[in-house]
Each structure stands twice: as C-alpha cells, then as structure tokens.
Amino acid sequence: MSVLVYVEHAEGNFKKSALEIVSYSKAIADQLKTNLIALAIGNVSDENLTALGKYGAEKVLNVSDKKLDNFVNEAYSFVIADTAKQEAANVIVLSNTFSGKGLAPRLAVKLKADFVSGAIELPDIQNEKFVVKKTTFSGKAFAYVELLSSIKLITLTINSYQLIESAVSSKIVKISPEFRDSDFRATVKQVVRSNDKTPLPEAELVVSGGRGLKGPENWHLIEDLADALGAATACSKPVSDADWRPHEEHVGQTGISISPNLYIAIGISGAIQHLAGVSSSKTIVVINKDPEAPFFKAADYGIVGDAFEVVPKLIESIKEFKAQK
Amino acid sequence: MKVLVCVSNVPDTTTKVTFTNDNMEFNTAGVQFIINPYDEIALARAIELTEGGKGTVTIVNVGKADTEPTIRKALAIGADDAVRIDATPSDAYFVSYNIAEYARDKNFDLILTGRESIDYNGAQVAAMVGEFLDIPSFSIIKKVEFDGSIATVDREVEGGKEIINVSTPFVAGCAEGVAAARIPNMRGIMSARTKRLEVIAALESGQSTRIIKYEVPPQRSTVKIIPADEVGKLVELLHSEAKVI
Ligand SMILES: Cc1cc2nc3c(=O)[nH]c(=O)nc-3n(C[C@H](O)[C@H](O)[C@H](O)COP(=O)(O)OP(=O)(O)OC[C@H]3O[C@@H](n4cnc5c(N)ncnc54)[C@H](O)[C@@H]3O)c2cc1C
Ligand SMILES: Nc1ncnc2c1ncn2[C@@H]1O[C@H](COP(=O)(O)O)[C@@H](O)[C@H]1O
C-alpha cells in the first residue's frame, strides 16, 4: 500500500499546484497510515526534488529520459501506471490541470481504478468507504462520489487545498522504466508559451471584464488593475466572442472554470452561465453601474458605479496599499 | 474520412439545478435538455471536415430513449447517422468503454468529443476512449486540421499551447476555437427524421463509481456594498476581512 502523487513542473520548478497535491496526498497517506511517494517526470534538480519532502513526500521518484522531454500523454500515463504498479499504490493523485486531464482518464483505464476528477476536498475515508466531493453542474452543485475499486484515482482542483508543511526527510530514487514505441505516435512540433505572467486557471487573484467595458480599447483598466494586484485577467463570453479578448480568457459554463481567492468582476451582469465558471471563487467583488445586476447577489463586496470612474481610483488605492506594505 | 462524434444530453445552461429523492437524484422536472455545448463544437468541426462528399459523420450517445431529441438535433445539424447505446450513462468509465467497444471495428479516422460535459464535468471520456482503443488522445484541443491522414492539433497546456502532429486515428476533446457551433436549417430538420438512428445494447464495463449524494452550494452571505467614492475601504476590507490581498 502507498499513496502516489504525480507532480508537474515547469522547466524543473514545481508550481504551487504541485505542492498543493503533495500536501493533499500526504493527508490521505496519513489517514491510511501509509507512505507518500511522489513521481516527477523530466529534468528536475535534486534540490527541487528533495524539497518535496517539506510537504510530506518520503520517497521522490524521478524519470528523466530524452524521450520524455515533451509531454506525450500516452507515454507519460504509461510511466505513471507502471510506477503505481511497482509501488503498489492504492491511491493516486494528480492535479486537475490540462495535463492532469489528459493523463488521469488513461490511468484510470490502465489501472482499472475508480476515478474522480476535480475533487475539492480531502476524501472522506470511513468504515471502508472512500467518498470524494467534486463540483458538478458547472459549479451549480457538488457531488459526493464513492469509489469502490481497490485502486482509487483523484485529480484535485487547483487552489482547493492549502500547502501544509510536514517535514520528512525524503529519499530521491532515479528510475528508468521501459517504454513502448507505440506510445510515441504524437509528436510535439512547437510549444507556444502565452506571455501571461500567471496562467488563468492557476491564478489566485483574477480581474475580469464584461461588455460593460464597451470595447477592447478600454481593457487597459482591467490590465492595470490586474498588474497592480499581481492578478491574471479574464472576461465574459460576449467579450471573447467579439474578439475583444482571446478565447482562453473566457470564463463560465462554456469557458474555463476557476476558483481563485479573489475574483473581481467589472461590467459583467452575472448571467447564470457566467457564474457557473466563477462561483467557487473564495471572495467575489462586483463593480457594476446597475444596482439590480444579478451578480451582486452572488458577490461578497460590491461597488455600484461607473467602471470608468471607479476602476482608476481602485488602481490608485491598490498601488498605495502595496507601497505601504 | 469517417468521423465519430460523441454527444451527451445535458440540462440547458440556464437550468436551476435542484435534487430529489433525498438529494440523491437530479430533478429533471421542467428541465430542458440540449446537446452539450462543446459537443456542438465537435459536431460542427466534423461536418466541416467531411462536407461535400469528403466523408461521413456518425453520432454516438450513451443514453436511454429520452435522449433521442438531442440525437435528432445532431442529425438535423448535419450528421449522417447515429447510434444510441441503450443505457443510463452511470459514469465516464462505463460511457467510454461502450463507445470504444462500439468504435473498435468500425475504422473511424477521428473520434471527437467535447472537452467536458457541463453536467458531470468529468473531462474524462476523450482520454478514456483513447486508452480503451490504444490510440492517442488529446483532452482539450483548440484546433484540428488535416493534411491527408496527418493532423495538426493545437492542444491546451499550462501557460500556452502545443502544436502537435499525429496520424489518424485519434481522439480529441473539442473546446472553443475548434469551430463555430451550427444551428439546424429547415432542410436539416426535415431530413433528420429519416436518417438512421440505430439502438444497440450496452455492455457491462465491470466497474463504476457511484454518486451517493448531491449538495447545492451555500448561499453567499449578503453582499457588502461599498460607496463608489470610498474604494479605499474595499482595499482595506479585502486585506483585513477577506484576507485575499
Ligand atoms: C449556452 C450558453 C452558454 C454561455 N456560456 C457563457 C460563459 O461560459 N461565460 C459567460 O460569461 N457567458 C456565457 N453565456 C452568455 C451569458 O448568458 C451572458 O450573455 C453573458 O455572460 C453576458 O456577458 P456580460 O455580463 O459581459 O454582458 P452583459 O450582460 O451585456 O452585461 C454588461 C454589464 O455591464 C454593466 N455596465 C455597463 N456599463 C457599465 C459601466 N460603465 N460601468 C460598470 N458597469 C457597466 C451593465 O449594467 C451590465 O450588467 C452563455 C450563454 C449561453 C446561451
Ligand atoms: N452519455 C454520453 N454519450 C456520448 N458521449 C458522451 C456521453 N457523456 C459524455 N460524452 C462525451 O464525452 C465528453 C466529455 O464528457 P465528460 O467526460 O463526462 O466530461 C462530452 O463532451 C461528450 O462528447
């Protein structure tokens, strides 16, 4: 028995979402009174690998092979499944990131594991039962899913678990699994990095604009506020449909779902389909000139006013606040 | 090119979600069902790729007879024929297993799904079907183009995208950007009535998760309105009360 956590990294550095799932997996391992093993694929320094011990990984496995320089779903899931078998893992945890979404369903099939994607809390493990809470109906409800098979697989929603330090000394083990050639049928031709500082799904703070901003020429308001806060930017669907903003920024039922600590919605009415993607944000601020805008009912803080007047003042105020700190 | 499009039948996006039977079942009373919005994108792309005699589009749905209006709508939009695998779609593993077993000997060049269903939000079916069939899968794509049997796929990854070359067959989950959803025209609606909709029995997948309970999120406490000329107060509250900055 063991808990296996697959940690993603960007050029050898672990992101916060990776440390989140190590903390989360450690809590599961403790409940099951078993060991936590972390697996990283690709080139990561020993120093960074060892640092996973800070969050509870007793053993850190690392596979580094030229063949795996680019992310190939089939080959990566093969390596993770193989490792899970070697380590007799009965709980396997991944992040519910884009790559996690690609890998985990394949793992579920390979390992015949019952699988919950997008968990938002620790599993409830009692009387031989293993129940995981996840968001369903695009944020309009939660479901408690019972996993029955002996191997359980979970992907954790980003920003839904705290980093918890539980220093253990960790042992690094380099492994070199065998590959199947047939797992390299897709070849990555080009990797295009968007120049955003913080990718939207991982951002802890998000500033979002809607049709109330009137046009793309006014987006400096959103961007300046985001810069002042160190936040990512998002938008409503009509805004990306009109090409004022790129589609990857569109949040909501048909866009991406986010759960940042702070979501600031400016000139967005709060349609049910928009709320579906943002309602699990911890704190919501709404700035809208219409006091009847439905978004106020879903907000924690509201300012009724014209964005073109309120936002510049808010930017100043944030800058002052940051300067004082 | 032979394309299979997986279509799921989901509650309309404006649905107010409630539950019955002690919060164990979704309350479908008065709920309008639609084609999952991402599946509409997948379908639109499949039609673009096969239009003008370049191929065929088959719809597959795992569902009971009540999903047939949704399947007919997909046929009206332009699919050539459809298959309904007759079962309640209990979870993604079961759905994917059945889709894969159906597709196994049919030589589809391309299998398209939506990136996720807006009811269960699993984002699982594309990759599971890929694994069952042992072919490549791309869970969230923003573009798919063909040059003969070689495709170029734009896959969404953390902090950007990857441009990938892959030969058929493969599975891809479609997101916005892949195509613009289409609406059926009169001719489509008329012809959909006579298009083939085959119903086949489902297979046991041997494993399944179980939803034991649903819960509606708690209401947010009432909003604190801050006067528009006191934005400094908002900053203060975000710091000291909400503790988010
Ligand atoms: C199937 C389907 C799926 C959908 N999916 C999504 C989705 O994923 N995401 C999404 O966002 N939408 C989605 N929608 C669209 C959704 O229903 C709304 O139409 C959309 O969210 C509205 O965008 P908005 O709030 O920016 O614009 P509007 O509804 O036009 O609201 C603009 C708001 O700005 C305010 N305003 C105007 N001027 C100012 C000013 N000067 N200062 C301050 N406030 C001002 C107005 O009072 C108003 O409340 C979907 C719709 C359908 C049918
Ligand atoms: N019951 C179903 N029948 C056919 N296709 C489905 C079904 N459920 C899900 N899908 C497909 O799988 C995609 C992802 O669904 P999910 O994994 O449930 O989020 C959907 O967009 C559909 O294309």
Image: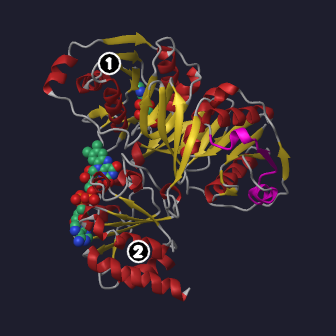
Residue B24 in view (yes/no)? no
Q: Which label was assigned to residue B65?
A: 1
Residues tagged 2 and 1 counted as in contact (Cβ below 8 A): no
- The quadrant of the picture showing ligand 2 is top left
Instruction: Point out the image quarter for the C terminus of chain A.
Output: bottom right
Q: At 35% across and 73% down in the image, what residue appears? A: A221
Which residue position is annotated with label 2? A224
In this picture, is A247 found above or below B221? above
Residue A96 screen position, x and y as percent: 56, 46
Give the x, y percent position of residue B48: 31, 29
Q: For this view, does B196 lie left or right of residue A145? A: left
How many numbered marks, from 0 up?
Answer: 2
Q: Which residues are magenta?
A: A46-71
Return the chain for callout 2. Answer: A
Residue B80 sits in quarter: top left
The residue drawn where x is 30% and y is 81% is B227
Name the residue furthest front: B147
Q: Position of residue B100 (x, y in %)?
A: 51, 19
